[in-house]
Image (tube, helix red, strand yellow):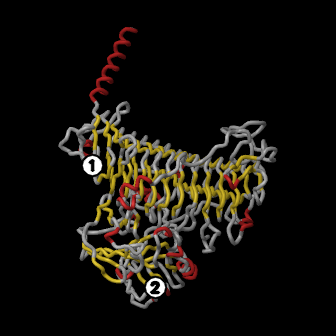
Amino acid sequence: MRKLVLQITLSLQLIFMSSVLLANNYYISPKGNDNNEGTLEHPFATIQKAASMMKAGDVCYIREGIYHETVTPVNSGTKEMPIRFQAYKGENVIMDGTKTITANWKPYKDGIYKTTVDANKIEQLFANTQMMTEARWPNCPIEQIFQHSNWASTQSGSEHGKLVCDAVAKTGIDWTGAMAYLNVAHQWWTWNRPITKHTKGSNELFYDANLVGLCGYTAEFRDKKWLDEKWGDDFFYLFGKLEALDVPAEWFFDEKSHELYFFPPDNKKPKELTISFKTNNYGFYAKEKEFIEVDGINFFATTFLLEKCNYCKVTNCNLKYPTYSRTITEYDADRKESVITKITGDHNTVDKISLGYSNNMGLIVMGNDNKVNNSIIHDVNWSGTLIYPALQLSGSPYLGVNWFNTIQYPPTPVTLENNEVTSYGNIASHNTLFNCGNALLVYQAANSIVEYNHVFDGGKAAKDVSLIYGCWPFSRGSEVRYNWVHGCVTDDWNGVKGDGGMGIRADDQSRNNSIHHNVIWNIGGEGIVAKGEFNLIYNNTLFDIKGKSKPSKSISIVLEKEPEPIKIWAAQWPQLQKQNQWSKVFNNLTQNITTSGRIKDTIQDGGANIFNNYRKEEQTVPLVDKYNLDFRPKEHSEIIDKGQKYQGIKFVGKAPDIGAYEYGEPKWTAGAKWEENSDWLKMLLPIKEKK
């Protein structure tokens, strides 16, 4: 018997070794030729040439250079023999999604130039790798993209379908036919609609009153006085008119004449710049493939899409301006998904990537047991709409237009049919996420693990927003732990500046969420909000949870107790008559705990559910150096060994400490373990600029 087993083992080893020996290495270079053999000495010119030939175990080594193509693998790899696309060691490989404009420019007027471009549309324009701004009103430099002071404000008399703004009348422009960005109503969705009616000199603009997802902001649900107040404190801006082109770094494209108008920055002439526009959405695309690996490839103005793929990996990649959508297409009349950086499928891994400057989504993963690790995502979602977080662990790949359909207002057949469908086991770990118009990290999958992430400076173009956000039974059983969460200070519901914003929120109808060992600070509204039932909130450290106008009335932890509201505009599960009857809050270093967003509803420790919490208005004494990211208890601090033992809590000493750190244990840190470097972009610049 042993002899037979040995023979079988040796045979399998020989088969594997034979497969390895039959695997091929292909080489690609901009100096190559697709008629070559694809060797190091005689490389191919395009990556796709190799992709069309590669089989399990093959490796494609890509030499330094700029590539303009969409790579689409034909075959899958195997667990032992993946198909691998890899930058050659130490070399810079860039997938470039732009086309350089070589046509001659002519002066137009007032520093503006124009040329004719062979393109049906232009949505994104670059000068020396820097994005330029499509002409808009009010003006907004790209570096101030999140500032609501660069949006126009509505006034009393505004309503669904109508904007009232005295400043519009002063522009001297007829805005009929322009496109509007509308951060209106509750201000956690944003829409685009064409201006259907406006008269030059008027302060009234009209658009079709068909905004998808208005949650109770219509006459069907509210009285006129309430609606007039809420629609009168909104934000919008206008674009799509040549007359709006009036400052450097702006442009306008006339789709009928194919004429491009450009106001160069820094008093330069177009011939002194490399001017290009986005033409290719995806530099790498795979569908229904397994065991494909992408390593060390950089993406400029293009991105990757892995659709229904399993066991694939994307590692060591940098993406700048990877996606751009001129409008929020998810809310357009025909409701289609924008171009986004996306992975659907199971057991996929994203590790050590940087992604920055997408006006819509950062990265979304949909499926089971996917991992996003050690990555940096920033400066995304410029519109402030909730459907575009920096990182999303999504609830279901079956619901269509990313996760928006999971809470579709009003419900659609696909929502109702799949409202119990979710994904499981996705992990976001050791990521650094910052600068986002709304939530930075959204978990909409069951049993998600959100851990050791540094999440900060979100909600920069919205209100009623939290930095880490979960919602509905889709996210049941998820765990949010060991994160640093800070910097969410927004307007509150009444428009009071600096009194809004949340750290971590398990929102409507959440179930079995565990939020523990997080450090949360510099929040304008509430630190942690938990709705639903069977939630655990323990060993968190919260400080500087205070609004600008009411610092003594801000809330550290909210454990909702009221009945779950019936929101007839949304798909709903059976509502609880009382929330969080069995949820527990303990061992937290906090200012206060309430059952609502009101300080008058403060609850004290006592009983089986709220216990061993350390409360002070200013949490300064117990920690080593909180403003330099050392949140450990000081020696002899009164919070040492004062916590309650609970299943799964590790500790030294007699009992757990209060708060997120255990005295005597190694100091844990959150965020990516590396720093982003943009030197790879220099290869895209003219020679004189590289210097």
At x 34%, y 39%, the residue is: 84
Find residue 367 and name its label. none
* Residue occupying the far bottom of the picture: 201
Quote the CA–CA distance across marks 2 and 1: 51 Å
Residue for badge 1: 30
Q: Secondary structure at mark 2?
A: helix
Instruction: Decide: few, some or many residues near mark 2? Use Cα within 10 Å; few <14, some 14-19, many ≥20.
Output: many
Q: Secondary structure at mark 1?
A: loop
Amino acid carrying mark 2 in the image: Val
Residue for badge 2: 168
Question: Image quadrant of residue 52?
Answer: top left
Of the pair 612 and 691, the residue shown nearer to us? 691
At x 37%, y 66%, the residue is: 127
Please state, as top left, top right, bottom left or bottom right, where the C terminus lies in the image. Answer: bottom left
Position of residue 536 relative to residue 229, above or below, is above
Question: Image quadrant of residue 16?
Answer: top left
- Are the residues flagged by discs 2 and 1 in contact, CB closer than 8 Å? no
Give the mark, 2 or 1, whose residue is nearer the N terminus: 1
